[in-house]
Amino acid sequence: MAMLKTAGVEKTFRTRAAPLHVLKGIDLEVSQGEVICIIGPSGSGKSTFLRLINNLEKLDNGKIWIEDNLLFDCRDGVNAVKMPGQERARALLEVGMVFQRFNLFPHKTTLENVMLSPMHVKKLNEEEAREKAEMLLTRVGLGDKFDTFPAMLSGGQQQRVAIARALAMEPKIMLFDEPTSALDPELVGEVLAVMKNLVESGMTMLVVTHEMGFAHEAADRVLFMDSGVILEEGKPEAIFTAPHNERTKQFLQSVL
Ligand code: ADP
Ligand code: MG
């Protein structure tokens, strides 16, 4: 079963200057347990693609399925799939997202940050939510930081809280948008270690990253995105050692 499928996904930003055709027809199928890394130059549409999947951005054209459930079938911004907003929102809870900036609530402790959504959205009681949050924070190596506020944590620790917070909603697929790009180099490893642990647990993952080592090691498939299209895709060995496309070669030369 495909955990996630997109067909002909297109997005244009109507800016004050010329319209910006940012995604030009993205077709992707992600199987259960599959780990896909998306690489590509800045501005190629990687973040927009993840944001569309999560409904943080409005789709212009194309279709998006989550677990074989067609949620969007859009033409010129009009969705032909009629379903109650609540039902769509529930389906979208299967998708967790971790951003480059951690977006933690600054006035809440790590434990509270992780407990919040399960209590408010999933209606867990406080005790259940606390138990789950403690378990997840321990899993990401923050078992001693339950009562700490985000400002007292390093960037790597904050990003691990953000991962725990996403996992607390029990998503079936996790989207990561350059989760280590805002971190000091010495903190990147601890976040990647948590992500590798997640890969090993069988999580389905779609990861936008510039960490080629991680992509090489963890990905089942690597996609190279450029100017709103997937120019090349394949197993990491193939993409990293014998890319076919000239643009892929150039990009890899510039980052490796
Ligand atoms: P990437 O993540 O690959 O760097 P993005 O998806 O963030 O690329 O952006 C793709 C292009 O769309 C960029 O040129 C960016 O400036 C533009 N863009 C992104 N979001 C918006 C927006 N809300 N309004 C206008 N332009 C945007
Ligand atoms: Mg981006």
Image: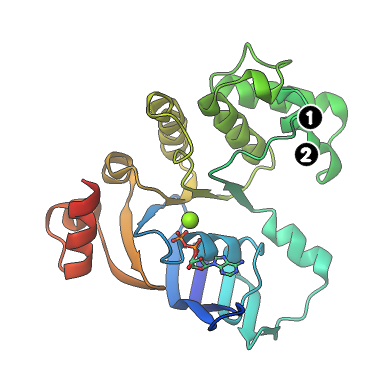
Residue at the spot of label 1: 129
Q: Is residue 66 visible?
A: no
- Answer with mark 1 or mark 2, whichever residue precedes in sequence: 2
Tell me how far mark 1 sits from mark 2, CA to CA.
6 Å
Please name the residue shown 17% across and 53% down the image: 253
As drawn, 256 above or below 201:
below
Q: Is residue 32 left or right of residue 40?
A: right
The kind of secondary structure element at disc 1 is helix
- How was the colour assigned to the protein in this rendering? rainbow
Q: Is residue 99 visible?
A: yes
Quarter of the image for the C terminus: give it: top left
Which quadrant of the view contains residue 212?
top left
Horizontal and vertical percent for residue 130?
78, 24
Q: Is residue 235 left or right of residue 160?
A: left
Amino acid type at image mark 1: Ala
Mark 1 neighbour density, 10 Å: few (under 14) some (14–19) many (20 or more): many
Q: Are marks 1 and 2 in contact (CB under 8 Å)?
A: yes
Residue at the top extreme of this rendering: 144
Residue at the spot of label 2: 118
Residue at the left extreme of this rendering: 242
Task: Return the residue nearer the eye: 68 or 216.
Answer: 216
Please name the residue shown 70% across and 26% down the image: 133
As drawn, 124 above or below 10:
above
Please name the residue shown 44% across and 74% down the image: 26
Horizontal and vertical percent for residue 105?
74, 34
The kind of secondary structure element at disc 2 is helix
Mark 2 neighbour density, 10 Å: few (under 14) some (14–19) many (20 or more): many
Horizontal and vertical percent for residue 90?
75, 58
Horizontal and vertical percent for residue 148?
70, 16
Residue at the front extreme of this rendering: 17
Amino acid type at image mark 2: Pro
Mark 2 sits near ligand 2, with its Cβ under 8 Å away: no
